[in-house]
Amino acid sequence: MMNFGEALEQVKEGKAMRLPQWNNDVSIKLMKAEDSKEMTADYLYVESRFGRVPWKETMIELLAENWEVI
């Protein structure tokens, strides 16, 4: 378990992160601008069985100390 900043550093290296109370299929990943035809800046997105959407974080999530890297 780690804080948001620690988990984010690993996401920047290609991993994903999630909070333990989320469904198992939900994770946060990084889309790099160089891998996207439309975007000009890197961004975090949520991936789940429903697809991918940009992640809109909450203060509770950002301040959580129990992020998991997957």
Image (cartoon, helix red, strand yellow):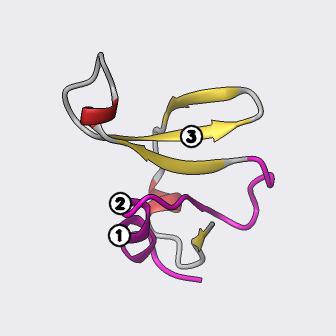
Residue 46 against residue 13 in the figure, above or below: above
Q: Is residue 23 magenta?
A: yes
Q: Which residues are magenta?
A: 1-25
Q: Which residue is at a point 44% across and 56% down the rendered structure image?
A: 59
Residue sitting at the far front = 35
Distance of label 1 from label 3 (alpha carbons): 17 Å
Q: Is residue 60 left or right of residue 30?
A: right
Q: Which residue is at a point 60% across and 83% down the rendered structure image?
A: 1
> Which label number is shown at residue 46?
3
Q: Is residue 45 magenta?
A: no
Q: Which residue is mark 2?
A: 12
Q: Do the CB atoms of the residues marked 1 and 3 lie less than 8 Å apart?
A: no
Residue type, mark 2 in image:
Lys
Residue type, mark 3 in image:
Val
| Label 2 element class | loop
Residue sitting at the far bottom = 1
Q: Which residue is mark 1?
A: 9
Mark 2 neighbour density, 10 Å: few (under 14) some (14–19) many (20 or more): some
Distance of label 1 from label 2 (alpha carbons): 5 Å
Mark 1 neighbour density, 10 Å: few (under 14) some (14–19) many (20 or more): few
Q: Quadrant of residue 17?
A: bottom right
- Looking at the picture, tell me which residue is in the foreground, 48 or 66: 48
- Looking at the picture, tell me which residue is in the foreground, 34 or 51: 34
| Label 3 element class | strand
Residue 67 against residue 38 in the figure, above or below: below
Q: Is residue 58 left or right of residue 8?
A: right
Q: Position of residue 16 (x, y in %)?
A: 55, 58
| Label 1 element class | helix
> Which label number is shown at residue 27?
none
Q: Is residue 37 left or right of residue 66?
A: left
- Looking at the picture, tell me which residue is in the foreground, 34 or 64: 34
